[in-house]
Image (cartoon, rainbow, N blue to C red):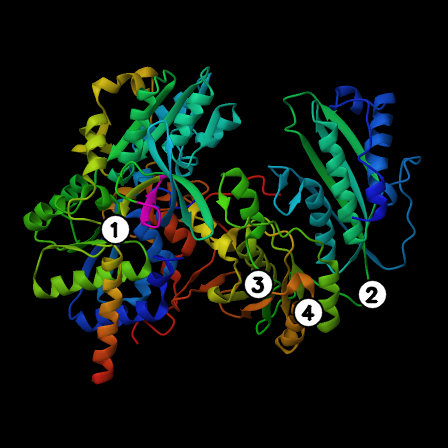
Amino acid sequence: MSDDDAACPLPASRYERVVLGHGSGGRLSADLLADVFLAGYGDRGPDAREDSATLAVEAGRIALTTDAFVVHPRVFPGGDLGALAVYGTVNDLAVSGAVPRWLTAAFVIEEGLEVAELAALVASMRAACERADVTLVAGDTKVVDRGKGDGVFVTTTGVGVIPPGRSLSATAARPGDAVLVSGTMGDHGIAILSVREGLTLEGPVRSDAAPLASLVEAVLAAAPDARCLRDPTRGGLASTLNELAGASAVGIELDEPAVPVGDAVRGACEILGLDPLHVANEGKLVAIVPESSADAALSAMRAHPLGERAARVGRVVESRPGTVVLRTALGTRRVLSMLSGEALPRIC
Amino acid sequence: MIGAMCLGIPGRIVDLEDDRGLRMGRVEFGAIRREVCLEYVPDAQPGDWVLVHVGFALSRIDEAEASRIFELLEQMGELEEGA
Amino acid sequence: MRYLDEYRDADAVRAIAAAIHEATTRPWVIMEVCGGQTHSIVRYGLDTLLPDAIELVHGPGCPVCVTPLTMIDRAHAIAAREGVVFCSFGDMLRVPGSRGDLLSRKSEGADVRVVYSPLDAVRLAEAHPDREVVFFAIGFETTSPANAMAVKVAARRGLTNFSMLVSHVLVPPVIDAMLDAGDNRVQAFLGPGHVCTVMGTRQYEAIAARHGVPIVISGFEPLDLLDGVRRAVIQLEAGEARVDNAYARAVRPDGNPASRAVVDEVFEVCDRDWRGVGPIAASGLRLRAAYRDHDAAARFAVEDLRTAEPAECISGRVLRGLAKPSDCPAFGTRCTPEHPLGATMVSSEGACAAYFAYRADDLVTLGGGAR
């Protein structure tokens, strides 16, 4: 927390709770905007005098992405809705090879939400924007009747700029390529579920929510010929690898014992009957790189604070295109499908 | 949640609690702790391992029996080396 | 994790698999009873470690799969009632009735909650005295002590808003029925390990003797299942037909008498309809008359249940080991975990669902099972 934050307490508002009038576009809306949003975003926020943000961007390609965030509970070990709303979108830009620059944030708030909670959410987004080095340039707020909204939903859209010469694509994987992950799988999903299911954890499992752009840059610097990058969110590593195998029309062989999984996550998965490979992550990278660049990419990951437990976990093969085959700890093989049986709702 | 119906997980009793006459306890599964009903294992004490199904301990895990298969494996290993 | 990791050790598993290879001289058909055992076999590819002569067939031990359609429809009708909080294990959420599933009811406004333990449902009833809390009590004998205790506790605490919709099923009658059927191929069983922690092993002695089949009570981890197969093969090769307890770390011959006492107090044996198999006498449990106040079937009169079972489904044959999921023309196409047509695809423990997730028939053996 910087000195500025220490000197600047949570913004004041005349209302303790959000009321319908806050979404009507009139005086109350303007007050909420000024008191909570603009005051909270600080220098990471928009110029609210204009209807649109106008941005100068260098020639070339931009990356554009959007995501809605409905995670429940809104606050969990290691993060909250606000952090997710920033990192989730920023990371989609980063894995496309773009440098994330700008975000928008639209809020749908349920009448009755405590303003203090909204302010905390905004503060969290501000800190996340700081960490991800992006600016929130536009936003919107609507309020719905009590009972129609479950607190607050946030949708963020992100814009990034792609440096020339980069081409990452889900269709680019080739037989012989190496499959790498940047760290432990399943942390985020289990952090959420542990709160929902009332699991007491010895040391709580913390969500891994984090901005991945600098890790991506490190990997691309070491392996400029990387084929594709993904952040394995909903559906976990299994779903991401299945998507990539399908998109590139290749097979992927995954070595189960090589996939890093934290002990607490492993234990929680046992109790809940889940497979860590199907559980969401919010601060991890999957990278498919040519074999010749694999060692360099792995070293680069491990040298980065977010990639300490990076590991080589599999390889791309020609056989059984579109299918991921798992080699279990017993040395047997089976297909690792996208389906996990029960979907885990509202993880992000 | 896959396989919840047959799911019986071994856990270690950490402490005992009473919920209005119902014998309960906190049980540790790896790094996770959960509240479990211990009515059906009245002799089980903190430190004991139990098999838990849908929030109820159904039996105590017998350590001696648990090692049997590994003793067998050791014997098999010895037989192999001797062959 | 202790008592789990060591039973997944690759070297140990390989050594037992090697012992099975050595012991097997002829083809044998072995059935594992429990859905959880099926799941483990397919998830770890254990059948690929066995000699080709051993055929593992998957049994009817998936309580979700065998819950009759009328019971599912009744559950859905109750869940749709105003003022009801319908609680169930996660497994039941997506089980299709004649019209949609519990999730559909939820989207239509029903208050459907997933609970981990039946005591959670009792707590809900205490917390919401103005609502009717109904718990869907399905399961084999393993779950009956928990469900019985929940009813006892509710009665003891004077809760008037807690009831259970009971559809318990018992293992020995369905094994008997299967073995009595003319088309039975099963020569030995891996018995249900967790059921036996409650019931003990004695019930299976009569079955083993009457039908001349070895029954090896087995656990759920790779080492447990392979050791179960090893012991079954040894008996088969020697022409024996005994009950062998290979899960002695958790199963006592007499099971857990304290839990059975509570079950006997609350439930009584009744006839039960098994989805995919048909009616089996004395194969289920229902609440005793004394606990009628907590019986959701009595409490909520549900009229006009018109059930419609998809004609294509071959669950019955799959549950008895007469067909593999991949034998079904609808498997993976018209029938998937997302849109299940019948019993064995509805739960992730069902053979069809397990095959679909892990595509067992597609498996490539890595170096076989021997040393």
Are discs 4 and 1 both within one chain? no
Q: Please, what secondary structure does the residue beneath circle 3 have?
A: loop
Q: Amino acid at mark 4?
A: Ala
Within the image, what quadrant is residue C220 found in? bottom left
Q: Pointer 4: what residue?
A: A303
The kind of secondary structure element at disc 1 is: loop
* SS assignment at label 2: loop
Q: Nearer the viewer, mark 1 or mark 3?
A: 1
| x and y percentages locating residue B28 in the rendered image | 41, 48
Point out which mark residue A164 bears: 2
Q: CA distance from mark 4 to mark 1?
A: 46 Å
Stretch in magenta = B45-55
Residue highlighted by disc 3? A249
Q: Is residue B19 above or below residue C125?
A: below
> Does residue C328 appear anywhere in the picture?
no
Between marks 2 and 4, how big is the CA–CA gap?
25 Å
Whether label 4 touches label 1, CB < 8 Å: no
Chain of the residue under label 4: A
* Proximity of marks 4 and 3: CB atoms separated by less than 8 Å: no
User: Of the residues under marks 2 and 4, which one precedes in the sequence?
Assistant: 2
Give the amino acid type for the residue marked by disc 2 in the picture: Pro
* Placement of A86 over or under C99, stated as above or below: below
What amino acid is at disc 1?
Ala
Label 4, secondary structure: give it.
helix
Label 2 crowd bin: few (<14), some (14–19), many (20+), radius 10 Å: few
Q: Which mark is residue C250?
A: 1
Residue B66 horizontal side relative to residue C43, left or right: left
